[in-house]
Image (cartoon, rainbow, N blue to C red):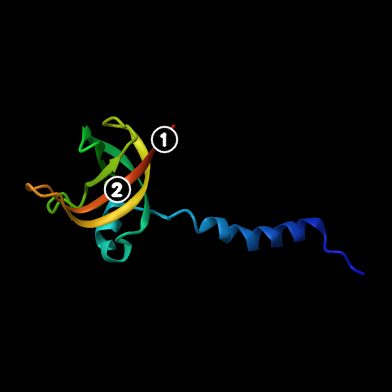
Amino acid sequence: MMKTPLPLATLLSALLVAPLFAQDAAPAKSVGDLYKERAALSGKQVTLHGKVAKVNNQIMDRNWVHLRDGTGDTADGSNDITITTMDTANPGDTVTVVGTLVVDMDFGSGYKYPLLIEKATITKAP
């Protein structure tokens, strides 16, 4: 009986098991990507890296964070995305955001968002 060397068995195990864990994490997208792919990503969990541009805390029982990453177009506003979260951040922080992408959210009274990442978690970069 021939035994498979441990390193090969470990490698095969990692190749077969790793995809099961990788499915939980959404691949990181840019702000520009979210605007371009909004129809396909609507209602899905997304991950985004960027710099906090503006923060409004405790409005409608949540914190509102505007994030930019240098992509998108300033002329049409696709360079900025709004995130709702219970976490806190400060303007200038570099962060990673994970949340659900919502398309065409209308809160009424003129508060309309073409894209919004809701119920997000924010992790500050070291």
Identify the secondary structure beneath mark 2: strand
- Please tell me whether residue 44 is drawn above or below residue 59 in the rendered image: below
At horizontal 34% and vertical 35% (from top left) the residue drawn is 87
Q: Is residue 24 left or right of residue 98?
A: right
Discs 2/1, front: 2
User: Which residue matches tag 2?
Assistant: 118
Residue 79 location, x and y as percent?
21, 49
Q: Give the quadrant of the C terminus.
A: top left
Label 2: how many residues lie within 10 Å, few (<14), some (14-19) or many (20+)?
many
Residue 8 location, x and y as percent?
76, 60
Residue 89 location, x and y as percent?
31, 32
At horizontal 27% and vertical 61% (from top left) the residue drawn is 38
Q: Amino acid at mark 2?
A: Glu
At horizontal 31% and vertical 66% (from top left) the residue drawn is 40
Residue 96: quarter of image: top left
Q: Which mark is residue 125?
A: 1
Q: Gap between marks 2 and 1, in whole Å?
A: 20 Å
Count the labels in the image: 2
Q: Amino acid at mark 1?
A: Ala
Identify the secondary structure beneath mark 1: loop
The front one of 73 and 123 is: 123
Residue 85: quarter of image: top left
- Please tell me whether residue 87 is drawn above or below residue 116 in the rendered image: above
